[in-house]
Image (cartoon, rainbow, N blue to C red):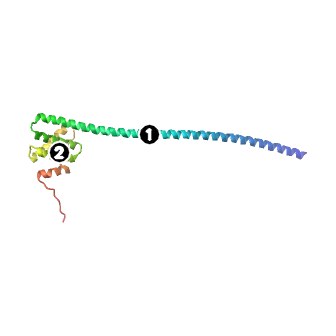
Amino acid sequence: QSQLHQTQEELEQSRSQLHQTQGELENYQSQLYQVRAECEEFRSQLDRTQGELEQTKALLNQSQHQLHRTELVLEQSLVQQHQTQEQLNRLQFEQAIASQKNDPSQMQYELLVWDAWYAYQNNDMTKMRECLKQSIKFTPFSHTETVLNWLDSFAKLSSEKGCDFNSYALTNSEVWKELMRPMLGVKKMTVAIP
């Protein structure tokens, strides 16, 4: 009987432990369900966030494309504005010399010198050289006087427009030296190394 009583106690203790273990297991399962539900919710949020991110990326790409197009249009507008301003300035200069000079040849000379100065201001040395070359056909001056007149005209036009003019840098440039050679009868010298 004592042994039976002890066995019953052990059985009750085992049942109690089993009951406690089942409770812990149910609690663990409940936590597991909760974690799973949170995981599902997180996945759902992640999917939504990824969708929003893709949408934002698409909008950003679209905005960048529109910005690039706007920049191109702005650049074209600035070029057109620059060209229009150049045409207006030249027309004003043409009208000013037309009221002072009757000789078409002299007018043509002055316009070509103005074009050369404008090219110089825009750092287009090739165009400057070509305009000055053409002006020689219409110049009323000797070669030396023409060269001095070019420099005087460049200085005067620069002063009127508030632009910088460095006669030393211009006259020492390779383009200017090339322009001077035929005018001053100087051939390009080549040095032969023995």
Residue 83, placed above or below residue 143: above
Mark nearer the N terminus (1 vs 2): 1
- Residue 10 coordinates in the image, percent (x, y): 83, 45
Local secondary structure at mark 2: helix
* Dot 1 alpha-carbon crowd within 10 angstroms: few under 14, some 14 to 19, many 20 or more: few
Q: In front here: 70 or 23?
A: 70
Q: Quadrant of residue 30?
A: top right
Describe the element under mark 1 as helix, strand or loop: helix
Q: Residue 44 in the image: x percent, y percent?
A: 57, 39
For image coordinates 20% across by 46% down, the residue present is 127
Q: Is residue 147 visible?
A: no
Measured Cα–Cα span from mark 1 to mark 2: 49 Å
Q: Which mark is residue 60?
A: 1
Left or right, residue 101 beside residue 30: left
Quarter of the rendering occupied by the C terminus = bottom left
Residue 131 numbered mark, or none: 2
Q: Nearer the viewer, residue 183 or 131?
A: 131
Q: Quadrant of residue 162?
A: top left
Residue 153, percent from left and from top: 15, 41
| Picture quadrant of residue 158 | top left
Q: Which amino acid type is shown beneath numbered disc 2?
A: Cys
Q: Amino acid at mark 1?
A: Leu
Q: Dividing the image into 4 quarters, which one contains the N terminus? A: top right
The structure residue drawn at horizontal position 30% and vertical position 39%, both measured from the top left corner, is 76
Q: How many marks?
A: 2
Q: Tell which of 173 and 109 is nearer to you.
A: 109
Rendered residue at 11%/44% (across/down): 138
Q: Is residue 143 visible?
A: yes
**Left or right of 13 in this view: 155:** left
Q: Report the side of 177 relative to 58 (left or right).
A: left
State the residue lying farthest toward the bottom: 194
Residue located 10% across and 47% down the image: 144
